[in-house]
Image: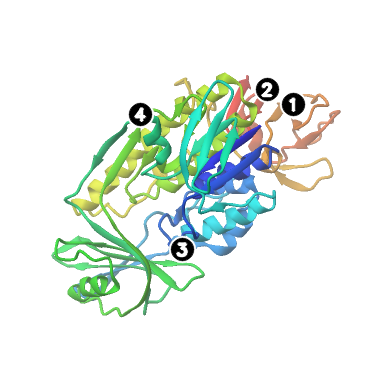
Amino acid sequence: MDIVIAGAGPAGLTLAIDLARRGVGVRIVDKATEFFRGSRGDGLQPRTLEVFDDLGVIGAVLTAGREMPAFRVHLDGEYVMERRMGERREPTPDVPYPNGWVLGQSQTEGILRDRLAEFGVRVELGAELTGFTQDGAGVTAELSTGETVRADYLVGADGGRSFVRKALGIEFEGVTDESVKMLLGDVEADLDPEFGYWFARAADPGSGVMMSPLPGIGLFQFGAPLGEADAEPTAETLQSILDGLNAGVRLGELAWSTVWRPNVRLAKRFREGRVFLIGDAAHVHPPTGGQGLNTGVQDAFNLGWKLADGSPELLDSYETERRAVAERVLGVSSELLRRHLEGDERAHERGAETQQLDISYRVTDEPGLAVGDRAPDAPVLDAGGAEVRLFDLFRGPHATRLIFDADAPEEPHTYAVLRPGVKAAGRYVVDAEGFAFSAYDAKEVVVRPDGYVGALTR
């Protein structure tokens, strides 16, 4: 099997890694001639960290990034308080990464590219997708290099202005609000990088400039309201805005900037035959809540194992599962944007609804764990008595079968989960503290390759 991915952002890279580790032939092309250097999506949600754990990059991501800092609020140039976007949570047996993580998008992409290279696949820059046709056996793609590529499937991960989506004629339903503009980017600033900052007027504390430190690169990501007279996305424009707030901040080099307008859109379909859409090609979000990059990564992780399997039922389930999630997440982002634009004092708050741990594909309202829910983690002991986690058993391009309180058959990735002191034949782990039994409350569970419950017997 061969798959072409158009677009080498986080979603495209995640999909490429997942396919490559399954032995699927993959090419990932991008029209850019150099890699993106800005921070853009710098917030990684807990569920995305779990995906990165499975893909084998969590160590690099945690080393390069940091937890969300406390923000120091300054009104009319005076420090007034310290606030956090959310309460810091301690890891629990079922959630090993309970807090969001800050890492600039270009750094995240670099880590993902390095991981992809370990499978012998590299991003092909300057290779724009210029056309494609499909038939019952595959897709023929044309590149700006003059090459014609034949593949089993094509995936559009090519952003909000997706060529793939437009070529398919798929509506991008939603709105773009031209009346609101923000200046976003990365800049040097004479501020303590241990903290984030909010600069505003006392008369209007909900409208101001955000400065958030970017770990490892000595820059701050900023977001500032942009009036009609402030048309140019330059350091001088940002400096003028800060001076107007009596922030007392001096800026240095501007590394990246853009003018952003509220853009909330959802593709009417995520698939047309052998062509699929993921990430911003399928849905675009306001930056509020840090959902866009994370939702794209989840799209890719949902689609990868289904493409590798190739069964019609699984391929059909991609749009069914992910479009509903994207629609819900767009609602979360839009509500946070509304609060921000209205100056709501709760606009900075980020709760469980942004962490994506509660995303589910379940089709029942019954209480307890159900098919389609995220499979919880739990600490267990392996046959040698060493401490491991259920996520260690799940990690990799395979489904995992757990059998509670009974022998496990000699099948790949199948484990008996036993209570202390119980003996069993075959492969097993011991639930020494009872967390696995409590979280699953089942006789048998099959965990899908993307970490969701695929089957459950009570």
Residue 405: which numbered mark, if any?
1
Relative to 13, is 423 above or below?
Answer: above
Amino acid at the residue labelled 1: Asp
Q: Nearer the viewer, mark 4 or mark 2?
A: 4
Relative to 391, is 256 above or below?
Answer: below
Q: Answer yes or no: do the residues labelled 3 and 2 have beta carbons within 8 Å?
A: no
Residue at disc 1, secondary structure = loop
* Rendering coords of residue 1 (x, y %): 66, 32
**Count of numbered badges drawn on the protein:** 4
Which residue is located at x 46 percent, y 74 percent? 218
User: Are there few (<14), some (14-19), or many (20+) residues within 10 Å of tag 1?
Assistant: some
Question: On the picture, is 282 further left or further right than 92?
Answer: left
Residue at disc 4, secondary structure = loop
* Rendering coords of residue 309 (x, y %): 64, 27
Q: Answer yes or no: do the residues labelled 1 and 4 have beta carbons within 8 Å?
A: no
User: Are there few (<14), some (14-19), or many (20+) residues within 10 Å of tag 3?
Assistant: some
Which residue is under mark 3?
37
Amino acid at the residue labelled 4: Lys
Amino acid at the residue labelled 3: Arg
Q: Which of marks 1 and 4 is nearer the N terminus?
A: 4
Which residue is located at x 21 percent, y 61 percent? 226
Q: Earlier in the sequence, mark 3 or mark 4?
A: 3
Relative to 199, is 146 above or below?
Answer: above
Residue at disc 2, secondary structure = loop
Which residue is located at x 63 percent, y 35 percent? 2
Residue 268: which numbered mark, if any?
4
